[in-house]
Image: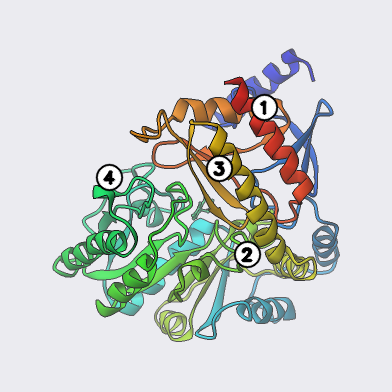
Amino acid sequence: MTRADVQELLERRERLLGPGNPLFYDDPVHLVRGEGVWLHGDDGTRYLDCYNNVPCVGHCHPRVVEALCVQAGTLNTHTRYLHENILDYAENLLAKFDDKLDRLALACTGSEANDLAMRVARVNTGANGFICTNATYHGNTTAVSQLNSIFEPIGGYGEHIRMVSWPDAYRAPYDLEGEALAEHYAAEVAAAIESLANSESGFAGMLVCPIFANEGLPGIPGGYLSKVVELVHEAGGVFIADEVQSGFGRTGKWWGYQQGGIVPDIVTLGKPMGAGHPISGVVARGELLDNYRRHEMYFNTFGGNPVSCAVAMAVIDVIDDEGLVENAAEVGRYVLQGFTELKSRYELIGDVRGSGLFFGIDLVADRESKTPAAAKAAEIVNRMRHKGVLMSKIGEHDNVLKLRPPLCFSKANADLLLERLDEVLASL
Ligand code: PMP
């Protein structure tokens, strides 16, 4: 594709889809095919995908594609007819969770899953108020967008929302560490609970990503999550773990909440669940979901259809059969070592963190002040794209390089990533 062709695509996009449809990279990538950890551009360029968590088992995995095609060619209906796929899938999925989390509801997007989780919490507590963090995103429905601190919802925030600081061991307030830092952040949650409990809204629950991915994948002070869950329960609230990014083996464990040593009341799932096919879910303690269903009928036309369930089942099977959770843990450690080695040579890297195959590289103007180096993050992401490696950036200050490759990422892939990143860092 020539420059003129790219320009034409961009203009067509703007004309048909309107402005405000963001694209990655100063020089957008036009992709035509994917396989495993590789993405192919229309000009024949092969990109190492270090960004996409949705195709968790690798792009266009043959077993997932086959499951989809076979079921699509057999039957696809909504869930008001009996079908075994949804039950087989529910059995397999729920077996991955702690025993208490034993009910499943299916939807299509992470936003819908979080929306449903909020409804379940509200019905069960009779309260309306929620706590979230002050630098996050949980979805696009009217109810869920109240929890988004990255974009302000239309009409502003309601009286029923309280935002707390996300826990951050790197830029810790008052140089606190460990237990004291966990206590410091948990105290904010306690204050937010009290404030809601004393308001008309009451306190329904707290909804957070258990690894605080959108916040910048921070180092979480040990014990923070268990303290917070305890506070939420003491106040009669529901703790919801948004596993839309952290679930399905991403962190080297099946679920991100396992990193924090907690068991949530509700877990929401999305993105990697169908490896690109739109399926999402709410996994909850049985009594919560059952009680909700006694009060309100939840129907989702496409949620839980036989094709989606066949695809999602294939995803779990591949993760198991190919040992992808273990691979994420092992290759993840290898990549982290590589990033740590780069940190020893480049002052720009203030902090390196992550678990499994989810990494954040915090870039700073200098290590003393830890001033976020957002422009450098943007420059690196764009330069890496031209070196055939796709990645992005996140965080409250937009200065954290974000890497989340498909779970089949190998040590050889890691070597290529590290080599290219070294070259780009040297070229700055
Ligand atoms: N939760 C988290 C943590 C997310 O990052 C996102 C999307 N980026 C969502 C929920 C919303 O998911 P979806 O776009 O599928 O509605």
Report helix, strand or loop for mark 4.
loop
Q: Give the residue at mark 2.
A: 248
Return the residue nearer the eye: 197 or 290. 197
First in residue order: circle 1 vs circle 3: 3
Residue 280 image offset from top left, x and y in percent: 58, 63
Q: CA distance from mark 3 to mark 4?
A: 29 Å
Residue 389 image offset from top left, x and y in percent: 70, 35
Q: Note whether residue 13 is visible.
A: no
Q: Is residue 144 left or right of residue 64?
A: left
Residue 232 image offset from top left, x and y in percent: 30, 73
Give the amino acid at mark 1. Answer: Glu
Q: Give the residue at mark 1.
A: 423
Q: Note whether residue 126 is visible.
A: yes
Residue 177, by quadrant, is bottom left
Mark 3 vs mark 4, foreground winner is: 3
Report helix, strand or loop for mark 1.
helix
Check whether the beta carbons of the residues at disc 3 and disc 4 lie within 8 A of each other: no
First in residue order: circle 1 vs circle 4: 4
Mark 2 vs mark 3, foreground winner is: 3
- Quadrant location, the C terminus: top right
Q: Give the residue at mark 4.
A: 156
Residue at point 60%, 67% (across, down): 253
Check whether the beta carbons of the residues at disc 4 and disc 2 lie within 8 A of each other: no
First in residue order: circle 4 vs circle 2: 4
Q: Is residue 309 left or right of residue 122?
A: right
Query: Is the CB–ligand 1 distance for label 4 below 8 Å?
Result: no
